[in-house]
């Protein structure tokens, strides 16, 4: 999402659950991840799963964060923006949230509207073009090779066009 132009900022909220998305900025309250964090979140998810009438707010939060953090680079980005204060190894944190909600059921996902807004933002032409540009022209050699390929194709089509004109 960062490469698609979505910015991350640390939100100042009363709860870690107050996540917002406005104008391409995903605001997430800070979370300190340490040894006891897993126990606390796991107990809250167990509580929500035990009482079907209780809304799965924490389960939704953990699912959202689990989908947001997919690689160690995601951990770095969130740490750089002071969203996650990580006291674990980065490779452990990327699996941290996924382990927590494994097998859990959320009848209502509280962050569905935010996910839809993010998807709509990512599907606009500018973020897609920016993503393609960043992935295609990552080094000077990649840029030079792209130009050489385009020049070769232009020359090839020019030759084919001249040959077509001679046949006519």
Image (cartoon, rainbow, N blue to C red):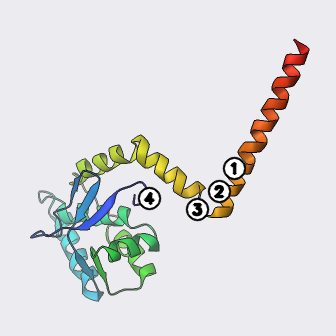
Point out residue 140 in the picture as x, y percentages from the top left corner. 64, 63
- The structure residue drawn at horizontal position 32% and vertical position 87%, both measured from the top left corner, is 87
CB contact under 8 Å: marks 3 and 4: no
Q: Give the CA separation, mark 2 to mark 3.
A: 8 Å
Marks 2 & 1, CB-CB < 8 Å contact: yes
**Relative to residue 43, is residue 143 drawn left or right?**
right
Q: Earlier in the sequence, mark 3 or mark 1?
A: 3
Q: Is residue 133 above or below residue 92?
A: above
Secondary element at tag 2: helix
Return the residue at label 2: 143
Front label number (4 vs 1): 1
Gap between marks 2 and 1 measured at Cα: 6 Å
Dot 1: what SS?
A: helix
User: Residue 18 falls in which quadrant of the image?
Assistant: bottom left
Residue named by callout 4: 3
Which residue appears at 43% of the width and 41% of the height? 125
Secondary structure state at the residue bearing disc 4: loop
Q: Which residue is mark 3?
A: 138
Quadrant of the image occupied by residue 19 = bottom left
**In the rendered image, which residue does mark 1 sit on?**
147
- Going by the image, does 76 lie left or right of 112? right
* Residue lying farthest to the right in this orientation: 167
Which image quarter holds the N terminus?
bottom left
How far apart, in angstroms, are the residues tagged by discs 4 and 1? 23 Å
Q: In the image, is 54 to the left or to the right of 59?
A: left
Furthest-top residue in this view: 168
């Amino acid at each position: 999402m960062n490469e698609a132009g979505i910015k991350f900022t640390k939100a100042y909220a009363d709860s870690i659950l107050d996540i917002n998305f406005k104008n391409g900025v995903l605001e997430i309250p800070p979370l300190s991840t340490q040894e006891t964090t897993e126990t606390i979140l796991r107990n809250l998810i167990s509580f929500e799963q035990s009482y079907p009438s209780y809304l799965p707010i924490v389960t939704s939060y953990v699912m959202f964060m689990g989908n947001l953090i997919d690689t160690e680079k995601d951990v770095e980005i969130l740490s750089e923006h002071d969203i996650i204060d990580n006291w674990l190894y980065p490779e452990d944190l990327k699996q941290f949230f996924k382990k927590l909600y494994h097998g859990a059921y959320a009848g209502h996902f509280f962050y569905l509207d935010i996910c839809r807004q993010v998807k709509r933002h990512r599907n606009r032409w500018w973020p897609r073009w920016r993503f393609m540009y960043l992935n295609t022209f990552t080094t000077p050699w990649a840029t030079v090779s792209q130009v050489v390929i385009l020049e070769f194709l232009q020359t090839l089509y020019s030759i084919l066009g001249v040959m077509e004109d001679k046949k006519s």
